[in-house]
Amino acid sequence: MFHKVQILKPLVVLAVVATTFSCSTPDPARLSEQSLIPMPVSVTATDSVFELTTDTDIYVQGGSEEVKKIGQYLADKLNPATGLGLEIKTASGEPAAGNIYLATTGNEAELGEEGYVLSVTREGVRLTANKPAGLFRGIQTLRQALPAAIEMNDKQRGSWKIPTGTIRDYPTYEYRGAMLDVARHFFSVEDVKRYIDLISAYKMNALHLHLADDQGWRIEIKSWPKLTTHGSTTQVGGGKGGFYTQEQYKELVRYAQDRYVTIIPEIDMPGHTNAALASYPELNCDNKARELYTGIEVGFSTLCTSSEITYKFIDDVVRELAAMTPGPFIHAGGDESHVTPMKDYIPFINRVQDIIQSHGKRMIGWDEVTNASLKPSSVAQFWAKAEYAKSAADQGAKVLMSPATRAYLDMQYDSTTKLGLHWAAYIEVDSAYIWDPATMVPGVSRQNILGVEAPLWTETITNMEELEYMAFPRLPGIAEIGWSPAASRQWSEYRTRLGNHGPRLKAMDINYYPSKRVEWSE
């Protein structure tokens, strides 16, 4: 996996041991018939169930605070709906029947850092992983193996049965992410936490935050304070905007880390910079501050690439961001710089790449950055031009796949969708699912690809309800593209799983688009 985990222990185990199960509700479908998203690598079903009861607790192997924290996360997911009051306890070995057991036990190369094995019998549930991140991913599968009502925030009636069998699972791509544009419209800390919870439930492990654009600057930079005292004060349509203090940003980073999600901050440049240009006149070649901007046009702004103060500015911003960002990447944007001549753009990107590297980070840039000379450590994010993606691969850089015609979550579903835009395409749920990163661009194969990301631009998106409507149900499908083997994915089968997933989306209080191309269960 591309990011570091705080405490890396050997293999992790989750074991839950059996109890007498109730006759009051029917047994669930076999494990192989559960609507699990993303689809696991391998599922082998047997014909029994395990049931959580009031006697069930969560035991963790002594010595790992990280595993204990994961155990508490699991308890916090199970207790509200079940009312069972599962507690976290320490054990030196597997506990007696009727309990959940988390432990580190070994190292299995095929599973990597995020893989796991979930084994359920009448006597228990055992979840093993090389690293705590794998345990966390496996818990998402365990959640989906329980009734959808497990996602409710208050006590529900019924029994809590898990079908028996074994799941062996690990990701296809190391990077599986979502991008949230908080510049066009600002989203609060609590909104971003909600999105982290939603993407991590589908085993995504990266959240790319688009922190600056023409319409607003959203991150406190102490060495350039006017970026937020002035540059953050508006947004598309003229609202009040907003920004994250450095403490709030660190809080988001910690929250994401606890869910094994890496935050990747983006400062778009040299274009998409009007908020900065309005805040500091010296960033403009004519030394005149620009007016704040609240529209949605692109391509009209540029930093003064010939001025040394510009690179002092970039170095300061990257330095402060890098100090708060434990993940390996800083995103430098680089897209749609229409008024920056190519003869200026290329040396600018090369120098920004060096600045980012000097602060111990790797540069990601939108696919236009391949016009420059990419280092092997850098990443080009393919969104528009296949030739740019191929150029990145030819230069030895990795490619992050975000084709606008498939993965852009702000694209309208069809011509009747009231939110979003359609400049790239109308993207129905099937279209967002039926593509393979490894075959999409000739000359860009799986070994060239870091992973997949689903961007959501917010020119028309103003709140979480609207965000969820555009992200769901497309985001789970893109999460599956990143996680599950391409050979096992078929739309005809996935649409059934997704339809059966409807009650879970409702239980999670997700405002999803009920596509007519899916038969939704009630």
Image (tube, rainbow, N blue to C red):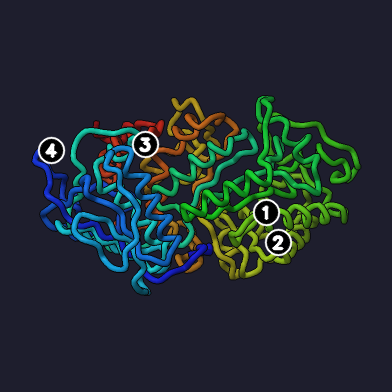
| Residue on which disc 2 sits | 356
Q: Quadrant of residue 500?
A: top left
**Which structural element holds mark 3?**
loop
Tag 4: amino acid: Thr
Q: Residues within 10 Å of mark 1 (few under 14, many from 20)?
A: many
Which disc, if any, is residue 508?
A: 3
Contact, mark 2 vs mark 3 (Cβ under 8 Å): no
**Pair 2/1: label in front:** 2
**Pair 1/4: label in front:** 4
**Pair 4/2: label in front:** 4
Q: Is residue 447 above or below residue 401?
A: below
Q: Earlier in the sequence, mark 4 or mark 2?
A: 4
Tag 2: amino acid: Ile
Q: Mark 1 and mark 4: span between their CA atoms?
A: 54 Å
Question: Residue 45 location, x and y as percent?
Answer: 16, 57
Q: Residues within 10 Å of mark 2 (few under 14, many from 20)?
A: many
Apparent side of residue 335 relative to residue 478 in the rendered image (left or right): right
Q: Earlier in the sequence, mark 3 or mark 1?
A: 1
